[in-house]
Image (cartoon, rainbow, N blue to C red):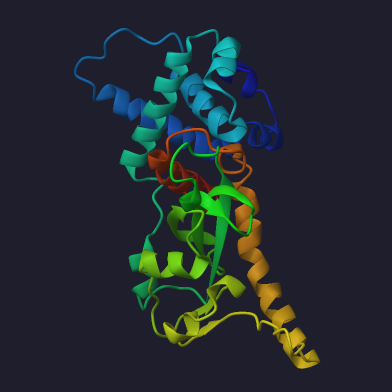
């Protein structure tokens, strides 16, 4: 479906089709057109208009089909689809309009947040030919790449991400990312972050039961209340994985995984701002 067809869709159907709202799409178009005007040597004009080029990139992230199948639909070569996706990604990232606030924001005393939620989202990958153990996640029982999501409950925005290989434990990923919080900022994480209270006083994790001792009713109630608050970040993970490039086995080079994850998270935040 090209843009002249997609523009006839309802607001709801357009979002389901592309993964973004119309306002976000129009902003993407303006950014790409502005970058195209800055070219000193524009070269041979593309067969596809800017709107169609952006739709190709969005469809690639949203559906994560192969370049071959997309080239058949759009009647262009595989290499053209590849170049267009890279081009759109680079322009949107360099524009900084879809950048996340960043972990430095968490140290700002003026941050208008009551609660920070942390969770790790895992994306499966194809089995690596080398160093397979580094990517094997014991929890998921497959090779994965991890994304640590830091989410503000009040603003409903993703503040920052951090990536690692599947073998790295969630709490070790947190320490490696050097994510720090303002002393009066409350933080809630899941059981994978046991020990975070030693690094940040106002942090809470569910109580784990031991082999010899079961949880009391009070402890179960405490865990239930904590999970009720923490569910918001799980919903964020689900919305990010609407872009199948984060939920299907990742086929591309791992160097670009973090870049794409941050860009998709930036698109999620843009929905709330625009």
Asked which quadrant contains residue 243, the reply is top right
Asked which quadrant contains residue 225, the reply is bottom right
Percent from the top left, x then y, of residue 24? Answer: 51, 39
In the drawing, does residue 196 fall left or right of residue 105? right
Percent from the top left, x then y, of residue 55? Answer: 53, 25
Using the image as rendered, state which of residue 75 and residue 170 is in the foreground. Answer: 170
Which residue is situated farthest in the right direction here? 217
In the drawing, does residue 214 fall left or right of residue 252? right
Work out whether 209 lies above or below 145: below
Using the image as rendered, state which of residue 61 and residue 123 is in the foreground. Answer: 123
Q: Which residue is drawn at 70% across and 81% down?
A: 223
In the rendered image, the quadrant that contains the N terminus is top right
Q: Residue at x 43, y 15 (%)?
A: 80
Task: Determine if residue 190 is in view.
Answer: no
Give the total of numbered labels: 0
Percent from the top left, x then y, of residue 163? Answer: 44, 54
Using the image as rendered, state which of residue 23 and residue 180 is in the foreground. Answer: 180
In the drawing, does residue 102 fall left or right of residue 245? left
Work out whether 38 lies above or below 263: above
Q: Which residue is drawn at 66% across and 23% down?
A: 8
Asked which quadrant contains residue 95, the reply is top left
Percent from the top left, x then y, of residue 209? Answer: 70, 83
Q: Which residue is drawn at 54% across and 51% down?
A: 136
Work out whether 123 lies above or below 178: above
Task: Determine if residue 23 is in view.
Answer: yes
């Amino acid at each position: 479906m090209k843009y002249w067809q997609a523009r006839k869709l309802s607001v709801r159907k357009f979002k389901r089709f592309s993964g973004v709202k119309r306002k976000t799409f129009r902003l993407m178009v303006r950014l790409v057109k502005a970058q195209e005007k800055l070219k000193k040597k524009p070269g041979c004009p593309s067969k596809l208009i800017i709107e169609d080029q952006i739709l190709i990139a969005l469809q690639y992230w949203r559906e994560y089909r192969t370049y071959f199948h997309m080239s058949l639909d759009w009647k262009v070569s595989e290499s053209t689809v590849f170049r267009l996706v890279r081009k759109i990604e680079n322009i949107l990232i360099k524009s900084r309009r879809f950048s996340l606030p960043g972990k430095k924001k968490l140290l700002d005393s003026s941050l208008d947040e009551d609660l920070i939620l942390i969770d790790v989202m895992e994306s499966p990958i194809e089995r690596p030919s080398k160093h397979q153990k580094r990517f094997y996640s014991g929890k998921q029982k497959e090779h994965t790449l991890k994304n640590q999501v830091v989410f503000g409950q009040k603003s409903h925005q993703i503040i920052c991400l951090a990536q690692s290989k599947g073998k790295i434990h969630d709490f070790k990923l947190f320490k490696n990312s050097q994510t720090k919080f303002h002393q009066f900022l409350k933080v809630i994480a899941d059981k994978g972050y046991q020990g975070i209270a030693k690094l940040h006083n106002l942090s809470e994790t569910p109580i784990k039961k031991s082999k010899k001792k079961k949880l009391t009713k009070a402890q179960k109630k405490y865990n239930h209340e904590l999970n009720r608050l923490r569910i918001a970040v799980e919903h964020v993970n689900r919305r990010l994985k609407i872009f199948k490039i984060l939920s299907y086995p990742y086929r591309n080079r791992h160097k670009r995984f973090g870049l794409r994850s941050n860009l998709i998270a930036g698109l999620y935040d843009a929905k709330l701002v625009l």
